[in-house]
Amino acid sequence: MKVKKILTLFIIIVLTLTTGCYDRVEIEQRAIIGAFSIELVDEVQESFEKADDAKQASSDSSFNENKNGPLKIIFGVINPSKLQSGDKAFKTVEVRGANIPDAVEKLGEKISRQPYFAQMRMLYISDKVLKNKKVFKEVLDRLDRSTKINETANIVVIKGETDNLAKVEPELENTIAAHIFGISENSKITANVSALPIYKFLSVIRNSDGCCFIPVVEIKNIKGKFEPSIDKVVLIKDYQFLRYLDTKYIKTFRILNNDFRSGRMLINYENISIPYYVYSTNKRIWLEEEEGKLKYKVKIEFEGDVEELEFGKDLFDTQTIDKINKAAEETIKEEFIETTKYFQDTIGYDYLGFKDFTHKYYNKIYQKYKDNWDEVFKNAQIEYDVKVYIRRIGISKK
Amino acid sequence: MTPNDDKISNIQLCVLVFNIVLGIGILTLPASLTKAAENDGWILCIISGLLCILSIYFMCYVGNKYAEYGLVGTLKKLFGGFVGTALAIPIILYYIFFCSVEVRLFAETAKLYLLPNTSLEIIILPLIILAVLLSRTGIESIARFFESITPFIFFLIFVLITVTIPKSDYSNIRPFLGTPLTKLIKGISVSIFSYAGFEILLLIFPYLRTPKKAFKFSSAGLIIIIVFYVFADIQCLAKFGVKETESFIYPTISLIRASQVPGGFIERLEGLLLALWVTSVFTTLVGLLFSLSVVLSDVLKHKKPKHIVSMFIPIIYIVALWGDSVAELFELSDKLMNTLGLYSIGILPLLMFLFSLFRKRDVKKSEG
């Protein structure tokens, strides 16, 4: 019995006093990182271009650690005690490092708390990083490998200097991260804003061998005020920056990529720009192969509400609604044709999801053309059939 | 009233099989399935599940026939004293290595996600000690413990399933049957071992109240696991696609990490999954340790299995610390399953089944 009691006591001591205690970190000891930006410093980028050798840029002795690594990472550290008061509740800390873990290590040399990434909301990547394939792939690998970074945080590319981000003064939120996260989450209700969580970005870029798009934050200086907006995307090809996609194509681009949830479209009807709010879309594609050429027929259905016409004009009439439907179908169809032409002729790569569709639904055909897909896409015949349904017109008849 | 006779009911058998099998595969399986059969991993999961049910049938057939003998007794009956005992030795090795790999995998996962600063030894030791404590108490207590935690496991699985469904692209599981047939057949060897654990049926029969219904209830336990595994695989594909799922070491944790509760009132749901993982690893370990103690005590002709199991604390602890890295650990695990696992799940039950068929004829002849 005595042995049993001693054994039980021993187990209780082992279980209560050892397991997990090594990892105890009180919440007031944590530095909650709301967001961080990654930028490649100019002089390093030049040396990369010249030598294409990371070692030369990051190290000049047998020690790999270097105070001035190629990456400039700015961490937005949240101060929880100020969140309720409405003051500026964050502090930015700039660090130079060879890579992300190195920068996090150096962040620990600058702040009194332990960096904590579980509540991260945004990750900003400078377009300079995208232009350097080697560095970009290193960043990707860290994001994919880390267990600490919150993978549901959104990723955006910063057009221009990331320093401008710190100059943004969020008015409705306490932190810049919350402000930009809020804008990107508006992708659910707006046509041109897109949001991309880190996990989805990593999946897409890996599954498509380095071909994807990332939303872009552009920070404009309007009368001395720095205002961010997300209405563009950047196209990545072979893990490298390809080009920015103009705002006018974003809406159709998102619909074709199944990224569109709801948003507003402007329909030209009798010289009035009618706001048509789309709340659901349905896309179906058929494929035929003819003499080595692929013929796609894309049928897209829109359901939504007309939000205004003209005061006094009767909209509570099926004939008028039919006419607007027709006008909308024409306008939207033209937009799709123009977007497709732009991708086929100007960009030359399939970012519109036809490759993915063919692989999933017409695998035999895909296997025939997969090695030469870009050429096949450029020469493919893509037809659109747009159907618009106006379901509601508001609460007024005229 | 349930008699206190160290025997278990059919429902308890179902719960036992479910809890022992759930544990090894759930975190890593979608990656190996996707590597083996790309989009058709879930089909592979079903095929190998059905093969396991066939193996269960063999075990139950033999078990029913020699219900009172136990594994070693049956082997001796079928193959003779010496050969029978020799055939049981690989099973003992299998259980020792299986326990060790399970414990080490648990510790590595816990260290990566939960306890980065806690040393591996401190994570491993309490788990082994607690599992040994429970497995010493006998099959009835083990089954009761499993019964009491099963609703909790089901609840967690239900919550986790619900949160992973939004924002999934199920078209990712297409094209169907795009994998070449040869690749699919090769993949079976990968996926079949994710159901390892049900081989407890080789030795459980003396502990069953109604052995005749064992096949029905143990298959039911395995079918629930098949459904969960198929769901986990489809969900990983729907969230990440083929290449990304394949690249993960623990795709199911990544799946939960990538999921959000609508409204965002709770975040970092992998904590829930890891709670489930801790419980399921513990139950698996208890089942394996119990099996080990039964087989070894039969081989050594020792009447009390609980004495045997305590002796294995240092052995399992040392073997668990063998592998240097996670990659080596997975390699070791694959080797274990492809040799001793294949023997315990496939070869031995089949041999026993075939020999028991001949035995039947012999008995009839001698009776005639």
Image: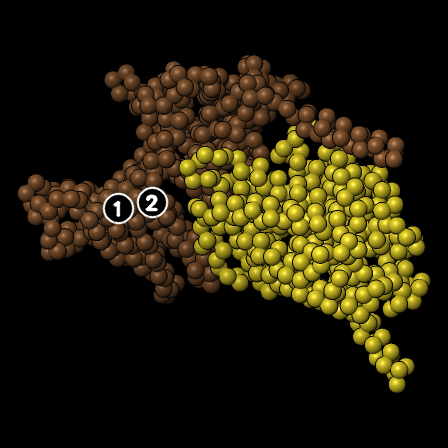
Chain colours: A brown, B yellow
| Residue hosting label 2 | A260
Determine the residue positioned at 49% across, 55% down.
B173
Is A374 rendered above or below residue B124? below
| Residue hosting label 1 | A278
Determine the residue positioned at 83% across, 32% down.
A5
Q: Can residue B262 be seen in this view?
A: yes
Residue A23: % across, % down: 65, 26
Residue A149: % across, % down: 53, 31
Horizontal side of residue B84 vs B30, given as left or right: right
Say which element carries label 2: loop
Quadrant of the frame with the C terminus of chain B: bottom right
The amino acid marked with disc number 2 is Phe
> Are dots 2 and 1 in contact, CB under 8 Å?
yes
Determine the residue positioned at 88% across, 50% down.
B304
**Label 2 to label 1, Cα distance in Å?**
10 Å
Q: Which chain carries label 1?
A: A
Residue occupying the far front of the picture: B1
Query: Going from the N terminus, do you reach mark 2 or mark 1 first?
Result: 2
The amino acid marked with disc number 1 is Val
